Image (cartoon, coloured by chain):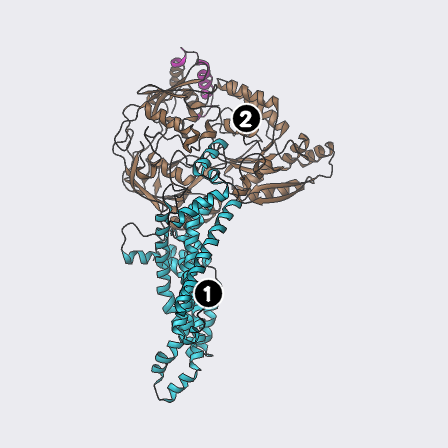
Chain colours: A cyan, B brown
Amino acid sequence: MAVARHLTARAGSLLLTLWLVSILVFWAGQVLPGDVGRVMLGPFADAQAVAELNKRLGADQPVLVQYWHWFSKAIAGDFGDSLAMRAPVAPFVLESMRKSAALAGVILVFLVPLGVGAGVIAGLNAGRLVDRLIVLAGVSLAIVPDFVSGLLLLIVFGLWLSWFPINGVAPDGAGFWTNGYYLILPALPLVLNLAGYIARMTRAGVIEAMAADYTRTAVLKGLDRREVVVRHVLRNALTPTIAVLATQSGFLLGGLVVIEALFGIQGLGNLVLNAAKARDFPMLEAGVLVMAAIFVLSAAVGDVLQALLDPRQRRRVSP
Amino acid sequence: MTKRSDIDFLRNQSGHNHTGDIWNVAVDEYAQGFLKRRDLLKYGALLGLTGFAASQGLFTSGARAATTGGTVRVGLGQPTKAIDPVSVTDPASIGVISQVGEYLILDDPKDGLEPKLALSWEADETAKRWTFKLRPGVKFHDGRTVTAKDVVASFERLVDPASGSSALSAYKGILSKGGAKVVDDETVAFDLDGPNSNFPFYVSSDVYNAVILPADYAGDFEKNFNGTGPFKLESFRPKQGASFVRNTDYWGDKALPDRVEIKFFDDEQAQVLALQAGQLDVIPSTPRLELSIDGNPNFKLLSVQASSHDQVHLRTDQAPFTDKRIRRALALTIDREAVVKGLLKGRAIVGNDTPFAPIFPSADTSVPQRKQDIAEAKRLLAEAGVPNGFQVTLTTERAYDIPDYAVLIQNFAKKAGIDIKLNVLPQDAYYGSATFGSSPWLDSNLGITDFGHRGTPDIFLNATLKSTGAWNAAHFNNPAYDALLLDYSKARDLQAQRVAAGKIQTLLLDETPLIIGYFSQYSRIVSTKVEGVRFTAISHLLLDRVSFV
């Protein structure tokens, strides 16, 4: 019962969030300089042509009317046509979600074993040299911005060693593995950036679990160390890590503007950036709403996982 | 190679009609070495002689037999919207379109006007009616033959405000709806809004929208890229790139490469890295990128001279620039040579505060060049009653080299006691709505605006300086100038054009509504493995003569 009520409340707050975001995007679009006709035809375009185009696109209507037009259609699942691409918005957004998801998938494939593995090693060796090295490396890598590490990786692995293609786009009809291979280089900056964070979360969980009563009990029962670590420590230690990973996945799935631009991946980040540049409001609205939905949902998934994995949290489920 | 006898022969060719004068002047000047070949072609073009002259072998260039085959790999920026010749404004889309689309005439940076889908053209006595003979037997990629109907529809579309055309401002006051007419299947006539001796440039690649498309074109260019060019579409992936293959039905010399592969890049650095990694053969260039390939034997920088420039406007209707002595003083503080050498790495020519770039044959090169003269600037300021200088804000856009240019101007002006505050805005914000009253570009007291290359000075002279000009950011309102401009547009021969131009140049130097310190070149970075990459200063990329070394 409590869970159902909780989910309803969650869904309600998600819809409210999205509605507020849609208004915010529309309002931001109004305060941006220039209008869609002007942007599409260029700064030197004839004023009459710009006016005609705005009229044709309905951009000359009062802002509330424009918003209502958009909103009433969006409610029915019709996100309209992109002004810049002259085609329905939905396929573009879906395609960019697919590309962002593929990139996020490759990032997680590397990030989870690396971050969690390093965190467990550090946690089990807390205070020793290896622990200090892991924490230091994690912190150092986290402060390198992704556009710097991305460029360095491109130069080293793409240009000097030629191990990877420079452009993150596999040719048409490439298979699963080829697509994955093309995404390794774009994934690495984020893997390096986040690994330290995930490792620290895991390490803290491991240290806490190692010091817990149930671990002491297990050791006293005479179970061997391996057994204790795998069955008791990790199960409990990974709870916060999993919640963090869920939240981070939202950030990864929501499009990575810098990395996508650098590697030419047409994910959500690129879609929203280009839509904003072109004042392509239908595209911008759809892109930002999808981003917002992904963020909110992944945070919710994180909470639910945390609750399922940690009995202590369950009582705190109702908002 | 031109022989004296060719010139005499040509002169005799044109002696029988009323337009002979202009041609004679041009030929004489050419013989004396004053006119470059490109300019001779321009004036030949005026008489519809180019096609003929070309057929006489007068203008053939010594091309070596090139190898065929291979794939040319091109990097371009990300197109800002769906690719469509009618509404195109961005360089990347122009680069793509130039693989498949063609114009009546190509304005080649080296050779001037080259007949493409038009075979020849001529004006009547008033230069108000122009008639173009079309090349027979040209086919669109879908197999249909190009007729006068398609050509007329292409231009009617461009001058129709309801079509989303981005060429309206180019045709304003020159060509209106109903002006293009079918004479017969292979002849098209244009009745202009007024006399214009430069009209062939307006149907050339200079107006990059003027691609000849089928009469029933519905705005869905991305579906099949249906044009008449040397390459035709193989595949197109929106936002990713496109590939093209040799058009075996092409009317002219078939393309040498088998394929052209274009990739769109969102990021400039990724583009140059892909080039360095040997994954691309050609990319657009920027001064920043040029540094990264400097001294690298695998790449070469190709440049064409252009009329693109960054225009500094001084609002003549607002203090402190109401006094022309103060405007002149500011212009005199600038060391143009230093700007060209330092900021533009020598890839520009010094400008003389008028739109008459040295590449325009009508420019009067005898008008003295303005040079830095701080003493004279100070004297003028004192004379104007501000011996200790004044404060002013320079508003401009964060684009290309402009912010650096603004800092240089700030430093130069200091030498004469002029204190400039900089206000650098994002490009969109600077242009604003591009109408007077709601655009920092058109409203600012002092500003810098980028202007792209044009094949003739007309649009600069009309739009930025005429009292009624839509881009007259200097708010220059000078009846003498407007009258001289009319003389210039009426001039029917090169000498008369040059005389009119000289008067305009002298007046603009005296009045200084604008400071034009340089005309930049347009460059691309090309792998040394490829030969024969050609391009225009407005981003057309011509790859049909490319061969691999």
What range of the chain is rendered magenta?
B12-38
Q: Position of residue B239 (x, y in %)?
A: 37, 46
B330 w.r.t. A236: above or below: above
- How many numbered discs sit on the rendered protein? 2
Residue A309 picture quarter: bottom left
Q: Amino acid at mark 2?
A: Thr
Reply yes or no: does residue B13 show up in magenta: yes
Would residue B234 be seen by someone viewing this image from the given angle? yes
Name the quadrant of the C terminus of chain B.
top left
B8 w.r.t. B413: above or below: above
Q: Position of residue B320 (x, y in %)?
A: 68, 35
Residue at horizontal 36 percent and vertical 82 percent from the top: A228
The residues tagged by marks 2 and 1 sit, at their Cα atoms, a distance apart of 60 Å
Q: Nearer the viewer, residue A244 or B103?
A: A244
Residue corresponding to mark 2: B365
CA neighbours of label 1 inside 10 A, class few (<14), some (14 to 19), many (20+): many
Q: Position of residue B505 (x, y in %)?
A: 58, 26
Q: Residue furthest front?
A: A1
Q: Nearer the viewer, residue B457 or A36?
A: A36
* Label 1 secondary element: helix
Would residue A115 be seen by someone viewing this image from the given angle? no
